[in-house]
Amino acid sequence: MQSQIRSNKLRVSINSFGAEVCSVKNKNGDEFMWQANKKIWGRHSPVLFPIVGKLKENYFIYNEKTYELPQHGFARDIDFEVIESSSESCIFQLKNSKDTYERYPFSFVLQISYLLIENKLTTSYKVINQSDAPMFFSLGAHPAFNCPLQSDEKFEDYYLEFEKNKYSRTLLNNGLRSTIKEELKLKDNKLFLKKELFENDALVFEENQINRVSLCSIKSKHKITLECDGWPYFGIWSKKDCEQFVCLEPWHGITDSEFSNKNLSEKEGIIKLAANTEFSCNYSLVFN
């Protein structure tokens, strides 16, 4: 099932399956979101919960028990309930079930709300710990944007505009964080896109380096700006050898390191949420 919210500038569609934004169109019918071509990458904007990235050997340990979880967790592959809906906003909810409990031993509520005002879409998250003990989790966004947007453009016509000229990037090894960091130097705060950027997986940034980034074209005035103050990790990804989309990903959590001991409570970037309390965060996308 799809929910739609509208403004005088945009029309946004969200699938209840995964509570995933699947379409953002302007008044001219331009589609900003990647349309999940299954032959390339069959998702639009998956929700990453209760982990971000991969677990070493695809399992974690909690209270001396072993639990298997796929990359980015399970929320992206479950139907959410729509609990509120209006012309400009909607709220989706996921609760733990017998199936989730077998893979993740906590009682929780995950709520995701979307609010559209003019050309700004704000996504807000609320995680409620209904367990009698602390809950350990990560949470992330993974929106994918058509790149190029127009038929007369190509991937290399696009660039990412940052707030600074220099960043520290963490290199990955088979999806896990290595100990190697690499300095990413930009010119005029710009990183031009090319498929070679993603030969070795995502660009990963730790230590709250990125709070704002824009996807821009040298051939049109179209621009997407992502604002994510306070999110400690950030990823930029496109599928290897693909020149059709790019993902901008704020994260509260990060993939395991090569040397992870697999204990969930000790996982890098994990959020520890006390019993019967809640965690909230949000990020915004401005479409021009």
Image (spheres, rainbow, N blue to C red):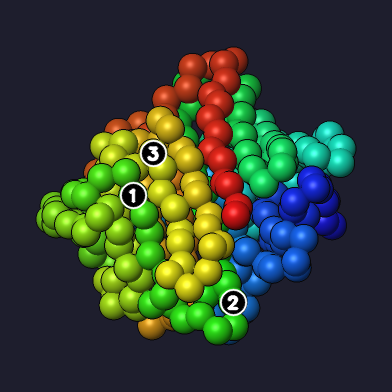
Residue at 33 percent of width and 49 percent of height = 162
Mark-to-mark CA distance, 2 and 3: 27 Å
Residue density around tag 1, few if under 14, some if 14–19, many if 20 or more, within 10 Å: many
Is 118 situated left or right of 284 in this image?
Answer: right
Residue density around tag 2, few if under 14, some if 14–19, many if 20 or more, within 10 Å: some
Q: Quadrant of the C terminus?
A: bottom right
Residue 279 in percent (x, y) is at: 54, 24
Up the image or down, 138 lies above or below 201; here it is above
Mark-to-mark CA distance, 1 and 3: 9 Å
Residue 46 in percent (x, y) is at: 58, 56
The disc placed on residue 189 is: none
Please tell me in which quadrant of the rendered image residue 131 appears: top right
Q: Which residue is mark 3?
A: 211
Given the image, on which type of amino acid does mark 2 rest? Gln
Q: Which residue is mark 2?
A: 150
Residue 234 in percent (x, y) is at: 37, 47
Given the image, on which type of amino acid does mark 1 rest? Phe
Mark-to-mark CA distance, 2 and 1: 23 Å
Comes first in the chain, label 1 or label 3: 1
Is 101 situated left or right of 113 in this image?
Answer: left
Residue at 38 percent of width and 65 percent of height = 159
| Residue 211 in sight here | yes
Given contact means CB atoms under 8 Å apart, are the residues at marks 2 and 1 in contact? no
Front residue of 62 and 53: 53
Front residue of 93 and 222: 222
Please tell me in which quadrant of the rendered image residue 111 appears: top right
Q: Which residue is mark 1?
A: 162
